Image (spheres, rainbow, N blue to C red):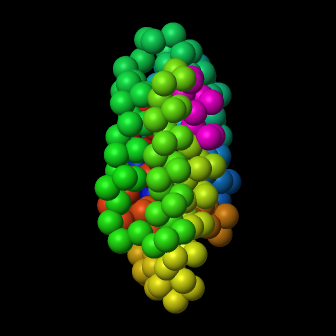
Amino acid sequence: MDPEAAYYQTVEEVFVSLRGDPLFLANPDWLLVREWREAGIPLRIVLRGIRDALDAHAHSWGRRRKVKGLAYCAPEVDAAHQRWRRAVAGGGEPVRDRAQVLGDFACALEKAQGLGPASRREAVELAAALRAKGQEGAELMTLEPWLQEREGQLLDRLREDLGPTAVGAVEEEVEAVLAPYRTRMPEKVLASIRTESVARRLLEAHRLPRLSFFHVGA
């Protein structure tokens, strides 16, 4: 399973199994999952919301009525997300020490292999910025957008050093992996997965992680 597509596929598998209906997700459902993914909601929080919604439905007066789509679970997913955010802010949710995670990112950038001149300069600058951020004690919810922006800048430099031919080869690999999903997911969802997959591959080629707390279980 493609790691980026796994988020979507796991949501589908859990929803379909709990709903007790063999029908798979429709296009609006996939687009809703994309909203959750792009909002940075951890998979376990989405699944918690889905389980809460369908469990409540199973014990309600309307339990004989069929749940038609994933939108039925959206309020519970949103509620679970808000509880998670409050828990993170208040220290009630286990979150890896932010300074340590940022330090690990910085170490990875300093040890990265095979970087070209543009990406090497970016990596050195970013490593220093990460260590400085770690000392500031910034909140997770403000750190994540900053990390996404800086990762985007690093990816731009990696593409610049690799050149269009090498980047095109990576994109072709991703297209081949995503082929089984083309008939099942709308193009907007595939575009999101494609972007994430290419980013991961470009970074992994230099033994670099995704620069996001989403990918370290925060």
Residue 154 covered by magenta stretch = no
Q: Quadrant of the C terminus?
A: top left
The residue nearer to you, when weighing 175 against 187, is: 175
Can you tell which quarter of the image residue 82 is in? top right
In the rendered image, the vertical position of residue 51 relative to residue 146, given as above or below: above
Whether 61 is drawn above or below 176: the answer is above
Residue 56, image x, y percentages: 52, 21
Q: Is residue 201 above or below residue 153?
A: below
What residue is rendered at 61% in x and 58% in y? 153
- Which residue is more in the foreground, 114 or 49? 114
Given residues 41 and 77, the one toward you in this image is 41
Name which quarter of the figure residue 118 lies in: bottom right
Asked if one can make out residue 134 in the rendered structure from this viewpoint, the answer is: yes
Q: Main secondary structure of the magenta part?
A: helix
- The residue sitting at 53% across, 31% down in the picture is 133
Left-right relation of 151 to 27: left
Task: Choose top left, top right, bottom left or bottom right for residue 194.
Answer: bottom right
- Locate the N terminus and report the quarter of the image it occupies: bottom left
Residue 93 location (% of width, % of height): 42, 17
* In-image side of 156 versus 114 (left or right): right
Residue visible at 57% across and 33% down? 143
- Count how many numbered circles sit on residues in the image: 0
- Which residues are the magenta region? 138-146
